[in-house]
Amino acid sequence: MMRQYELVERVQKYDPKANEALLNRAYVYAMKAHGHQKRASGDPYFSHPLEVAAILTDLKLDDATVATALLHDVIEDTDATRAEIDQLFGPEIGALVDGLTKIKRLDLVSKQTEQAENFRKLLIAISTDIRVLLVKLADRLHNMRTLEHMKPGSRQRISEETLDIYAPLAGRMGMQAIRDELEDHAFRWLHPDAYKAVTDKLAELRAKNEGLVEEIEGALKAKLVEAGIDASVSGREKKPYSIWRKMTNKQISLEQLSDIYAFRLTAKDIADCYRALGVAHTTWRAVPGRFKDYISTPKQNNYQSIHTTVVGPRHQRVELQIRTHLMHQVAEYGVAAHSLYKDMTKGAIAAGSMTSLDDKEHGPYVWLRRMVETLLEGSNPEEFLEHTKLELFQDQVFCFTPKGRLIALPRGATPLDFAYAVHTDVGNAAVGAYVNGRHVPIDTRLRNGDEVEIRTSKGHVPPAAWESLCVTGRAQSAIRRAAREAVRRQYVELGRRLASAAFDAARVAYSDDAVKRVLSKFSQKSIDELLAAVARGELAAGDVLKAVAPEAVQAAATQSVLENPLKGWLDLTKVSGLRVRAPAPGAPTGQLSSAIALKGLKDDVPVIFEEGGAVPGDRIVGVLEPGTGIRIFQIHSPQLQAYEHQRWIDMSWDIDPEKQERFPARLSVTAPNRPGTLAAIADVIGGAEGNIDNLKMIRRASDFTELRIEVEVFDLAHLNRIIAGLRQTDIVSKVERVFE
């Protein structure tokens, strides 16, 4: 076990200004707090926080982070308190330790909601201070190194958790060295047979290709020296988990996997990187399709390097990674790279500010901030976790806005994902997309280098179905949130109309202010919640009226007893408690007293048209279904029989002539079975400006065919013109409107 002075010396070796007294206090306090506690291995428990601190010294982190590592378990596992930590070590370290304490054990096997919520806590704590993540990853790394002492069930759970969350999270933060080790430890315990098979095969290849790595290193160095390029070369064998993952993804054997050796060329500057690339490609044959330039286009975690594969000595495929020394530090240690901290104050580190690298559009903090924004906007914890896992595991594509802004997206992303990556408002208003100047469907898969232009429309609300067209959690959450908000507004507006109709029937003027005064009677927090409850059928509009104006309700009841009902009024108790005036003879269809106005398909009232549809000009009735909204039926629809005992609402049309919308209707057409029939029918409908939405052959005989055609029309007069046009043709023998 590392001694106190050894730890201090390790920190002072890279940070001579480190607070020695702080480190000594933390060492002694943690040792006393954990006392005689033991780990599963039988070692003193204090050895664990000490090893975590040692890992962080390898990353050259500041004294506060190292002290936090020593103390990270004291609040959770001992009698120590947050107040005591604040008093002895200051509020900065107290907040770090508290942030780690709040992150309870994740459980992938069960308690899915608890796991998701804990992950939310983790990201919130990380976004507050990135050092929480660094300590947490070091903690997990040491636990994985000593996992053999745990029970088999615990090993399985912890390894799954590591592979699902911690390893990809380390990768997203650019900490590749830690990610590799976490993955290999988890691989060893989750797939022991595969792990042994891969390691045994690698040992065979190592013996077979003895001296190959040194030979390639020597050849590369000689060529670089010859070209006058000062660069170091190091070769390595790829990690077992990396090899196994490629074998699994590509469905190939280890013998078929050609590039199991990777060589890193580290140059002094970017110009030498590209010169070294030229040397490699002129010396050996490059493998087509295996070149990637992450220097000019960095990954989202700030990773920069040139990747290429060449056929080197002994006809061996060799992967080359070419980068500068600074790029190498960032590639290995990510946000923990010492070079990122050296010019920063501790306050800046705590705030998560990462010099100029954090200002890039695709830096690791951009991803982290977006994740935190998503969870703070109220998305479901389980959904948030699933979306985050998707983004953690997916490779990236890089696309550009018309102005040249770079947008990094997961592979398989669509223009919708791109729109939401630019800004949530852009995504919500998106109505079309142009990729490389061509108009494309909104679900087109984007490729590297695509230039994407998003067309927007004010007031547009993304359909809920668009969620399935996206792969990013940001886009999916935003669409779901917009859909929820649209539905909420719809129910509020419907509730207001229902309440207004009830008030009008009682000759009482409706006002939101009057309704606000009775919110407490219904245990509602706001008028919107009350009105939405009315719309959902949870609260009767009549009850709201009674609470607001009980005297008016009593007077109306007394009056109805003393007087005969007015001519033309029907007392329909199932119509939401309202009396509905029947249309007078010759009155325009749909003009009903106390009816709710239907403004169209895109109105802010939750409306669903039943099969067969209804069009402006039809006499219509609505059925209020709790939690669904209003189902609209044409008054003659046979489907109404199924809703005979439910609440009906008379509806009227209120169509804006300046904004014509199409409505669904269904026709049954019988025509001779001969060539050109379908074309003639389509020609008539198209000539009348109707739109065929769907067509089905119901019955086909040798002489006649019965067709079911779903059309979209502006109103009843428009539909009648189409029907008349079809009847006038000699090719149609029968046409009628149907509602089933």
Image (spheres, helix red, strand yellow):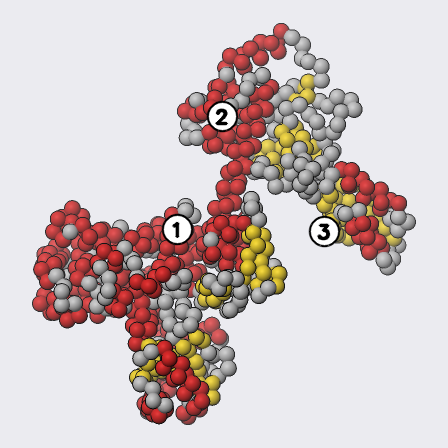
Residue 659 at x, y percent in the picture: 66, 41
Q: Residue at x 37, y 80 (%)?
A: 271
**Number of the label disc, if any, that sits on residue 710:** none
Crowding near the residue tagged with mark 1, few <14, some 14–19, many ≥20 C-alpha atoms within 10 Å: some
Which residue is label 3 attached to?
A: 694
* Nearest to N terminus: mark 1 or mark 3: 1
Q: CA distance from mark 2 to mark 3?
A: 44 Å
Is label 3 in a helix, a strand or a loop? strand
Taking the image as shown, residue 571 lies to the left or right of residue 351, namely: right
Which residue is label 2 attached to?
A: 512
Q: CA distance from mark 1 to mark 3?
A: 42 Å
Identify the amino acid type marked 3: Asn
Does 575 sit above or below residue 408? Answer: above
Q: CA distance from mark 1 to mark 2?
A: 33 Å
Q: Quadrant of residue 332?
A: bottom left
Taking the image as shown, residue 125 lies to the left or right of residue 460, namely: left
Q: Residue at x 55, y 33 (%)?
A: 493
**Residue 159 showing in the rendered view:** no
Identify the amino acid type marked 2: Asp
